[in-house]
């Protein structure tokens, strides 16, 4: 009897030790079309975002963090592969499947190694909850790209109550569990996502899990709930509608954070938060609603307002709390950072850098001497592109949306010193020809290397 008791105690202690040594859980939260300063901690005075702010207070806030692209699909490709979107094989937004053959664009190539595939090899259960927008053929869908489980929509946006993609007809219902179409008519998509995440936590809490939580908010259609529309009733349209959707999103993030704490998992869970790019000035977004603060530009633009995004990381058990990093970092860096935090080997060359040294010592310089962007095409005579080296930034084929009844601002080349002119008001191409030439040469050299690598 005594021997059985000792064996029971030993087994219990051994199990507890194994549990305490479990790899950290990972939740990557990607919002959609959220403005560069649209959190309280980034300066928004008219919004209510206590749970997004809570992640920052429990971790690190980045003030010069960049999206990999100012549009949805290329940004997501950069996040999931740790590479620039061109190196990941994705020039621009993935077309709806009806147009894929016409445009010969099918999404993220299945040959690319995603975050999900990397972590899955290290024993992680992997799930995508929310928006995919990286391809529609079987080989391009989430379950073929490393995700054990998928609940969400394949296309770029949906109505949050009917879960229908309203665009060029016919309208398409777009809600799936793995590859099976499912129906929850009338239920707000954000509530469905929270329920799905709670179920994963319930069933997978004894093994490491990776959840990529890709909101379709505050992307149009703006559909914050009545609670938040009432809260913001005194704000003008479209800020009111946008703000309601932001706070609804914040509320759902809080529900998941609370659930992790209830299950004593918060300390062992890495939370990463980022917007995929800047706010939208599209007609479907009422020509606005979001804010980039002092920064010029928005979605589709390579001005700062299109690519500088809110970004946070929190891992209470191991990383510093309530601190700020004010040097240039970029979306691809999460791949290398998560590999380091989970002790997962990276099997191929990526563009991202491990941010842990910087998080441990925010006084260090940026891990990037040069940053590159290009989207829309591998041909830089057609594509918008940009390069940043130090405080200098050069944009090529600039095309800045400016909202309702205003023509886009365009320029062949636009040079700015971000330290001296963070609002990007003054084009210094003519005044600084040497710097313009240096950055143009660096861009052309980089693009040549990318094309060589891709066999283009």
Image: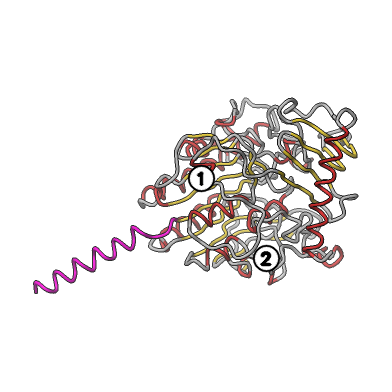
Residue corresponding to mark 2 = 112
Instruction: Kindly state the secondary structure of the residue where label 2 is placed.
Output: loop
- x, y percent for residue 269: 44, 51
Please report the bounds of the magenta region as a residue range. 1-24
Residue corresponding to mark 1 = 253
Instruction: Kindly state the secondary structure of the residue where label 1 is placed.
Output: helix
Residue 111 in the image: above or below residue 338? below
Q: Is residue 17 magenta?
A: yes
Query: With 422 as the anchor, is 439 left or right in this view?
Result: right
- Tell which of 329 and 25 is nearer to you: 329
The residue positioned 75% from the left and 26% from the top of the image is 421
Q: Which mark is residue 159?
A: none
- x, y percent for residue 415: 82, 34
Report how many numbered discs are placed on residues in the image. 2
The residue positioned 76% from the left and 30% from the top of the image is 417
- x, y percent for residue 287: 77, 36
Is tag 2's residue or tag 1's residue first in the polypeptide sequence? 2
Residue 135 in the image: above or below residue 235? below
């Amino acid at each position: 009897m005594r021997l059985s008791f000792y064996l029971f105690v030993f087994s219990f202690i051994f199990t507890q030790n194994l549990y305490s040594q479990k790899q950290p859980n990972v939740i990557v939260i990607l919002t959609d079309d959220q403005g560069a300063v649209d959190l309280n901690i980034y300066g928004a005075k008219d919004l209510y975002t206590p749970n997004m702010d809570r992640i920052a207070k429990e971790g690190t806030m980045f003030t010069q963090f960049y999206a990999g692209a100012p549009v949805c699909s290329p940004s997501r490709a950069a996040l999931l592969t740790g590479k620039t979107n061109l190196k990941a094989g994705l020039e621009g937004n993935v077309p709806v499947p009806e147009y894929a053959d016409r445009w010969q664009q099918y999404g993220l190539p299945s040959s690319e190694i995603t975050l999900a595939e990397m972590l899955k090899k290290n024993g992680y259960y992997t799930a995508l909850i929310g928006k995919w927008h990286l391809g529609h053929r079987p080989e391009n869908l989430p379950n073929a790209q490393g995700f054990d489980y998928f609940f969400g929509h394949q296309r770029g946006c949906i109505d949050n109550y009917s879960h229908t993609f309203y665009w060029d007809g016919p309208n398409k219902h777009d809600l799936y569990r793995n590859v099976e179409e499912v129906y929850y008519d009338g239920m707000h998509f954000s509530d469905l996502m929270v329920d799905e995440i709670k179920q994963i936590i319930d069933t997978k809490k004894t093994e490491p899990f990776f959840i990529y939580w890709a909101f379709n908010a505050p992307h149009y259609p703006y559909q914050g709930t009545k609670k938040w529309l009432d809260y913001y009733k005194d704000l003008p349209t479209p800020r009111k509608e946008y703000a309601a959707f932001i706070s609804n999103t914040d509320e759902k993030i809080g529900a998941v954070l609370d659930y992790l704490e209830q299950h004593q998992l918060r300390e062992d869970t890495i939370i990463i938060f980022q917007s995929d790019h800047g706010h939208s000035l599209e007609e479907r977004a009422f020509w606005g609603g979001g804010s980039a603060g002092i920064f010029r530009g928005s979605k589709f633009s390579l001005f700062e307002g299109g690519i500088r995004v809110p970004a946070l990381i929190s891992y209470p058990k191991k990383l510093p709390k309530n601190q700020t990093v004010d040097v240039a970092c970029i979306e691809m860096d999460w791949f290398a950072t998560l590999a380091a935090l989970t002790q997962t080997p990276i099997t191929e060359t990526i563009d991202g850098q491990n941010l842990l040294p910087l998080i441990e010592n925010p006084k260090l310089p940026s891990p990037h001497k040069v940053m590159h962007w290009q989207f829309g095409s591998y041909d830089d005579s057609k594509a918008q592109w940009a390069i940043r080296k130090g405080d200098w930034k050069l944009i090529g084929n600039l095309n800045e949306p400016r909202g309702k009844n205003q023509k886009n601002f365009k320029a062949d080349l636009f040079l700015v010193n971000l330290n001296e002119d963070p609002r990007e008001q003054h084009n210094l191409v003519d005044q600084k020809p040497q710097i313009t030439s240096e950055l143009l040469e660096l861009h052309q050299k980089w693009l040549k290397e990318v094309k060589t690598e891709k066999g283009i």
